[in-house]
Amino acid sequence: MIIVLLLGVLVLVIGGCACVVWAERGGPRWARAVATVTLTVSELLRSSRKNRRRGLNRSSQDDD
C-alpha cells in the first residue's frame, strides 16, 4: 500500500516538473496553472525545511 502511495506521489512530482518545463516554453493555460501550483508548493516546502532547520539549530545552541 505504501509503495502505491509513493508511486502516486512520484507521478505527481514528475508531472508537475513536466508542466513547469512546458509552461516555460509557452504551453497551454492549464499547464501554466499546474506549473504555478507546483512552484508554489515547492517554495512552501523549501521554506518549511529552512524554518525547521533553524529551529533545530537554536535548540542545540540553547543546550550549551
Image: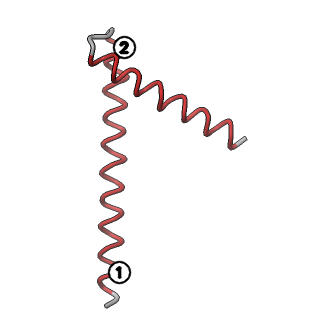
In the rendered image, the quadrant that contains the N terminus is top right
Residue 56 to residue 12: above or below = below
**Residue at 41 percent of width and 22 percent of height:** 18
Look at the numbered disc 1 and give the secondary structure of its residue: helix
**Coloring scheme used:** secondary structure
Graded by Cα atoms within 10 Å as few (under 14), some (14 to 19) or many (20 or more), the crowding at tag 1 reads: few
Q: Which residue of the protein is positioned furthest toward the top in this rendering?
A: 28
The image quarter in which residue 38 lies: top left
Q: Position of residue 9 (x, y in %)?
A: 55, 35
What mark, if any, has residue 60 been given in the picture? 1
In the rendered image, the quadrant that contains the C terminus is bottom left
Q: Position of residue 61 (x, y in %)?
A: 29, 82
Which residue position holds label 2?
30
Q: Which residue of the protein is positioned furthest toward the right in this rendering?
A: 1
2 or 1: tag closer to the N-terminus: 2
At label 2, the amino acid type is Trp
